[in-house]
Image: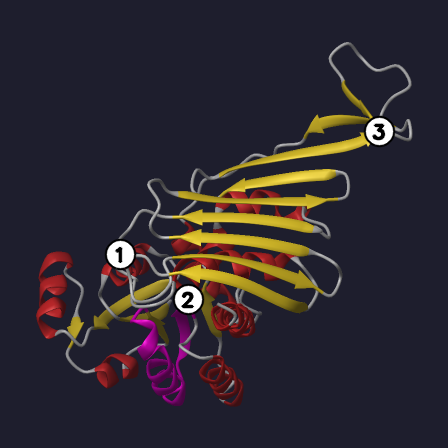
């Protein structure tokens, strides 16, 4: 089993601690948090060992799970890599693209593994339909959240929209050629609601909306491709696949048949896959352990995390 340690014991850090403790892939050694009072409180509440020194924790483990505020990701990652440790790093990967590139280069130099916590890749609804996503040409995403002061130190693009950016980049095998966006600050010092349009070299267009001042939560993405419409509800963990095929010569009474202006008839049918429930965070941590043990490529690489941050930065700069 890989020895794991967590940097950061905030809301998400505590979730990671509990899941690493449950995992069959890891031995949870302990955690470090710069707030000593919080560290002692978490140690008392959950029984996980609190290290008062970051260096001591890193020295004691094989894999460092970085769940600190984004501004400190870079320093934590560099320190861990230079001590020869694999790193799992929460999204966004770092504060700047330059920092992300430096981490990628350093990780390669030390021949270590790294993964970024873009957890929606492990959402069971997305996992159920991703094999059916073939060259979508229009994508629409809505990621809306009720206001929560936690996370408002960064723009909504880095807080919420970056999830959808990563999903889109993992599906569209083409380069982003143009970005346009608008953002509005309502309650925070940084934009709370944003809309972005991504245009790809292959002609695909993605329209993304993110808000952290909504009255209800929503996390939906719709993919449109030739002969298919695919909808993913990341919040409810549901998906819907509507497909078209050439209509039969003698359709049944209940067959749904459409005819276009040219007289071509198509049959509409549903091809909804089974969604197997899972714990997405546990899955991403466990698959990272498998990548380390089997010397394979992690599902969400540092390159993926860097490209998602690159596009997010372009969106923010175009406000």
Question: Count of labels shown?
Answer: 3
Q: Position of residue 287 (x, y in %)?
A: 48, 60
Query: Label 1: which residue?
Result: 18
Q: SS at mark 2?
A: loop
Q: Which mark is residue 301?
A: none
Dot placed on the residue nearer the N-terminal end, 2 or 1: 1
Q: Residues within 10 Å of mark 2 (few under 14, many from 20)?
A: many
Instruction: Give the residue displayed 62% in from the left and 32% down from the top.
Output: 272
Look at the picture and state if 29 lies above or below 134: below
Q: Is residue 193 left or right of residue 295?
A: left
Look at the picture and state if 177 lies above or below 233: below
Q: Position of residue 220 (x, y in %)?
A: 50, 43
Report, in whole angstroms, how far the alpha carbon at label 2 lies from the one at label 1.
19 Å
Q: SS at mark 3?
A: loop
Query: Label 3: which residue?
Result: 260
Query: Label 2: which residue?
Result: 91
Dot placed on the residue nearer the N-terminal end, 3 or 2: 2
Report, in whole angstroms, how far the alpha carbon at label 3 lies from the one at label 2.
45 Å
Q: Position of residue 194 (x, y in %)?
A: 45, 57
């Amino acid at each position: 089993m890989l020895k794991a340690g967590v940097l950061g014991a905030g809301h998400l850090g505590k979730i990671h601690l509990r899941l690493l403790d449950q995992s069959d892939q890891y031995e949870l050694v302990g955690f470090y948090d710069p707030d000593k009072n919080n560290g002692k409180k978490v140690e008392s509440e959950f029984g996980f060992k609190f290290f008062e020194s970051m260096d001591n924790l890193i020295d004691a483990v094989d894999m460092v799970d970085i769940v600190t505020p984004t501004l400190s990701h870079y320093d934590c990652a560099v320190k861990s890599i230079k001590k020869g440790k694999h790193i799992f790093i929460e999204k966004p990967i770092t504060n700047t693209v330059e920092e992300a590139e430096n981490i990628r280069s350093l990780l390669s130099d030390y021949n270590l593994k790294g993964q970024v916590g873009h957890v929606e890749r492990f959402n069971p609804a997305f996992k159920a339909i991703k094999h059916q996503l073939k060259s979508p040409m229009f994508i629409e995403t809505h990621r809306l959240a009720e206001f929560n002061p936690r996370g408002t130190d960064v723009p909504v693009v880095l807080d919420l929209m970056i999830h959808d950016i990563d999903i889109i980049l993992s599906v569209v095998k083409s380069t982003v050629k143009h970005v346009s966006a608008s953002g509005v600050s309502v309650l925070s010092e940084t934009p709370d609601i944003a809309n972005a349009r991504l245009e790809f070299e292959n002609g695909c267009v993605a329209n993304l909306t993110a808000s952290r001042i909504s009255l209800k939560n929503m996390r939906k993405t719709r993919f449109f491709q030739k002969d298919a419409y695919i909808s993913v509800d990341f919040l409810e963990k549901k998906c819907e696949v509507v497909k078209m095929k050439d209509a039969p010569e003698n359709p049944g009474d209940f067959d749904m048949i459409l005819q276009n202006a040219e007289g071509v008839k198509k049959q509409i049918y549903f091809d909804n896959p089974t969604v197997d429930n899972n714990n997405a965070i546990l899955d991403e941590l466990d698959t990272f352990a498998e990548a380390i043990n089997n010397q394979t490529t992690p599902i969400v690489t540092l390159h993926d995390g860097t490209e998602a941050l690159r596009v997010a930065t372009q969106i923010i700069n175009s406000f």
